[in-house]
Amino acid sequence: MSSAILTVKNIIKRFSGTVALKGVDMELYPNEILALVGENGAGKSTLMKILSGIYPYGSYEGELLLGGKVCKFQSPADSEDAGIAMIYQELNLELDLSVGENILLGRYPRSALGFIDWKKVHREARTALDMLGVDIDTKVTVRNLNPSMQQLVSIARALYRNPSILILDEPTSVLTEKEANSLMDILRGLKDKGISCIYISHKLDEIFALCDRTVVFRDGEKISEYTKSAGYGSSKVIEDMIGRHLDAMYPVRKANIGEEVLRVEHFRVAHPFAYGKSIIEDASFSLHKGEILGLSGLVGAGRSELVSAIFGALPKQAGKLYLEGKEVNINSPIEAIQHGLGFLSEDRKKNGFIWTMSIRENMTLVCLRDLVKGLFVDKRKEVQLAQEYFEKLSVKAPSLDTQITNLSGGNQQKVILAKWLMSDIKILMLDEPTRGIDVGTKSEIYKLMQELTDLGISIILISSEMPELLAMCDRLVVLGKGTVQCEMLHGEANEVNLMRAASGT
Ligand SMILES: Nc1ncnc2c1ncn2[C@@H]1O[C@H](COP(=O)(O)OP(=O)(O)OP(=O)(O)O)[C@@H](O)[C@H]1O
Ligand SMILES: [Mg+2]
């Protein structure tokens, strides 16, 4: 093999209370797409933040070598100048600037007189977006774009910098399958042009399809590596990731379905981007006790908007809601919670947690009213309950009192999920609950869903992962063109007929 363009030598990174990287060695070769996989909290993002200069030289031990020379990045700008571009797991855009401004940020072309040449800014931004085959107006403010569009803008920004090494930290978690596929084609094209990539993802099929080599991290250490040419199987990689053998991803679904608990009648919900239009025109469906109901449909079919409207997080334009046969009026999430509804929203950054609080405080936000003893919160019970879920979902953190901001992306997701699992709810709506979650924990979440329905709780599940929907749902409602296209029972549905129903073909 030719010599490495990037070498990571014995890197150790400590945070108070945690050693995130415990002496990691890794190489990246020319024309290579390298996958980095590992459980939530394994240290993947931390290593990438060292490469991108977020954690400056001196804040870690060990060395980074680019083309054989030691790098001492003091800032992200130093890393960019050395040819490394990074797409972060958390979006990293200036929300109030335009698409064009974001793509060229810090590199605005200037006229002879020193003024910013705005025409050129937008022209060059357009060229970067065209490389991705994305048709977004470069003058639109980034805040007004949906998460997948925002992700594409950050990818365009990285490409505009013409990097020799591109790092992508879970780039497809908010992309549609089509967008993800086109991103992979782009990465293959970049590789042919001599750009090497480090690619982090929890979606192993993606990794096996795209990457030349896979490095597995566990607990801040490199555990193993596999090359595509030598062939590798997912079960071995999974075993290395989670440190045990995973028998089955999904529990065998045993449903005990009772009477109707929720009925949605003729819901109409406004379109989030197109003023005056409705994303849901007229949707009706019901949910039964102990049932897992899947909402299926293409992105943009309004699945998230529909459940947000049921939860009172979005206003509905028309429609009626019945709980256990009685009509109810839910106008806010607080009222929804009072009626026993829970909602894990897709956009956890915006609606999921309170940044300044600890893991325990975030977990017990909703169930606090059940923990009140006289005038005070029963602290012992609160800690006990939080500890139980902390362990059940194997949240990786030094303690329950760790600030949620210090957790890895996947572990933050686990805390929000725990918040709903701990509260006294009858109906739980889960919008992409396993996004960014490692395979081992995913299977724990499926088991928990089974346990919840055993207790008589009903679940509405939205997921872009078809196998997840097919394995877990007792019934599927397919949304399309603003309405319910059809319903299918577990066993009737498969990837083909679901896709057909969703696209109306
Ligand atoms: N700023 C911080 N302060 C304290 N601890 C941190 C900080 N950032 C990360 N950690 C800890 O370092 C460890 C590694 O986190 P990292 O974000 O690198 O994980 P990851 O492999 O990217 O996980 P995920 O798949 O969930 O994104 C975790 O235990 C995390 O809690
Ligand atoms: Mg991460």
Image (cartoon, helix red, strand yellow):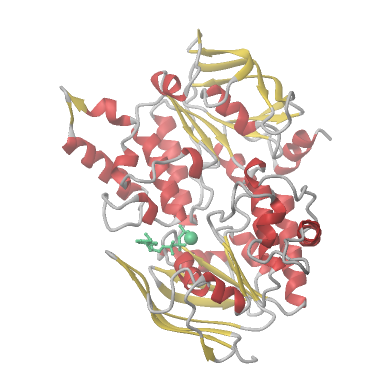
The answer to whether residue 214 of the structure is visible from this angle is: no
Quadrant for residue 222, please give it. bottom left
**111 or 442, which lies in front?**
111
Label count reads 0
Residue 29 placed where, x, y %? 62, 83
Residue drawn 58% across and 68% down? Answer: 233
Left or right side of 248 for 373: left
The answer to whether residue 320 of the structure is visible from this angle is: yes
Ligand 1 shows up in the quarter that is bottom left
Left or right side of 401 for 165: right
Residue 61 placed where, x, y %? 37, 81
Residue 91 placed where, x, y %? 56, 54
Q: Is residue 67 above or below residue 208?
A: below
Q: Is residue 186 above or below residue 228?
A: above
Q: Which quadrant would the N terminus be assigned to in this image?
A: bottom right
Residue 276 placed where, x, y %? 74, 23
Residue drawn 59% across and 87% down? Answer: 4
**226 or 419, which lies in front?**
419
Q: Is residue 160 above or below residue 133?
A: below
Quadrant for residue 104, please give it. bottom right
